[in-house]
Image (spheres, helix red, strand yellow):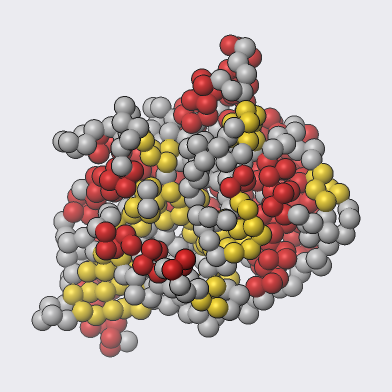
Amino acid sequence: MTVRRIMGTEIEYGISVPGQPGANPMVTSSQIVNAYAARPELSKGGRARWDYEEETPLRDARGFTYTGALYDPAENLADEDSGLANVILTNGARLYVDHAHPEYSTPEVTNPREIVLFDKAGEMTMAEAALRAAHTPGIGPINLYKNNTDNKGASYGAHENYLMSRQTPFADIVAHFTPFLVTRQIFCGAGRIGIGQDASEHRFQISQRADFFEVEVGLETTLKRPIINTRDEPHADAERYRRLHVIIGDANLAEHATFLKVGTASIVLAMIESGAFDGTLGIAEPVAELRAVSHDPTLRHKIELRNGKRVTAIELQQSILEQAEAYCGADADPDTREVLDMWAFVLDALARDPMELADMLDWPAKLSLLNRYRERENLDWGSAKLQAIDLQYHDVRPEKGLYHRLVARGKMKRLLTDTEIIDAMTEPPGDTRAFFRGRCLARYPSEVVAASWDSVIFDVGADSLVRVPMMEPEKGTKAHVGELFERCAAAKDLLDVITAD
């Protein structure tokens, strides 16, 4: 058993234009993406478009495909036709406009630490994009926030993707992953002032997203959001793989929170694939308990299980961890052991006092900041000043964002260095197909006309397009094809070698 698997994240960033509350978010999001596309390594060739040909966003994991006006494929693929900005980056990631937000999707990676690395590269990418936009004639300042709600009723996503075995019954995922997702917010919530989708009740809660989920299982991602999303779009060999699209989760800034979020999820999914759970942790009312856990920063709320037992979120997570320790055993590889040890450390600290983790996790860090201001200035939770501090925690600008200022002062623990993150803005991971995608865009920018997660399309002249499929995510790695890029001066040379093989 190992925590390692193909995984990635997708983050939609909040966006605002100072002094222009009515600014069109689709236009400003496009300005952000296009500003970053002016980077030298991205602007030296024709911009590759995103290839939608193999995408099937309406296929449901329960065995059917939605049709009809309510589920119109054109709605899901509208950005290609409407001219919204899209850039495929040399690190294998995708930066584009998703409806009213700029979104950064990491390249595929194989372990939690690299999720943190490329997720952080996304933050730096957005910060640079905003800076470039501010210096572009006719645009001016645009502020970006790595958060999940405008506190006026709108929410935007922080999604995760995990490739797993197609042989795993989807019903098992629903049964055993739901209790984990409902309670993991205690270590990966980003914190928020406001209860309810419109934040009408002035109190602090653990998660930014909890109040926006309404059903247990479903295909939607923007309305009637489900705890378990059923989109069945593997972007890989569909006979072997399922891509579990996880839409319930906050956009984290704290590196340990992101690491734990994806690391623990990967372990739990491995256990589900192996049939390791006994079903005793099922929650009676998952949607109601999701919100109740989030609304109680004291972590004392008791969740009612289907068997009638009542446990706190910490106790439920500790039960999952105990089963994970038994399942992984003493032979767990170093990556898995790092996740297990951090999981145990964090749960123990949460049980004592969540504020012990104000230097590791987002919601305790934010709550600590807010409480200091409340006490110093005698403010209640409805204070506009506290709302501003809440938002400012998520600002991507290093000199303005309160998270970044905590880091600069040594108040937040880190897993990575800025140098590592800067390198990851342009360099792809070496052990997935993202290496092939990223290197093609870096080496042959004028010859790549389109790409997607599972293919790259080349223009080799004479009105001839060649699609190279990449259905196996662990092929096309640096070990597999790295040497080819050193000796193939043009895409045609590369294709000749690939075709010959």
**Is residue 109 toward the left or the right of residue 23 in the image?**
right
Q: Looking at the image, which residue sits at the far front?
A: 69
Q: Is residue 411 above or below residue 500?
A: above
**Is residue 410 toward the left or the right of residue 466 in the image?**
right
* Residue at horizontal 52 percent and vertical 26 percent from the top: 387
Q: Looking at the image, which residue sits at the far top?
A: 377
- For the C terminus, the quadrant is bottom left
**Is residue 302 toward the left or the right of residue 331 in the image?**
right
Q: Looking at the image, which residue sits at the far bottom?
A: 500
Q: Which residue occupies the foreground of this view, 479 or 367? A: 367
Is residue 170 among the parts visible in the rendering? yes
Please tell me in which quadrant of the rendered image residue 54 appears.
bottom left
* Residue at horizontal 43 percent and vertical 38 percent from the top: 145
Q: Residue 213, image x and y in percent?
A: 61, 51
* Residue at horizontal 61 percent and vertical 75 percent from the top: 62
Marker count (numbered)? 0
Q: Is residue 480 above or below residue 406?
A: below
* Residue at horizontal 21 percent and vertical 79 percent from the top: 465
Q: Which residue occupies the foreground of this view, 412 or 485? A: 412
Q: Residue 361, image x and y in percent?
A: 61, 38
Q: Looking at the image, which residue sits at the far left?
A: 462
Q: Residue 419, image x and y in percent?
A: 39, 42
- For the N terminus, the quadrant is bottom right
Q: Is residue 388 above or below residue 73?
A: above
Is residue 336 among the parts visible in the rendering? no
Q: Residue 185, image x and y in percent?
A: 65, 46
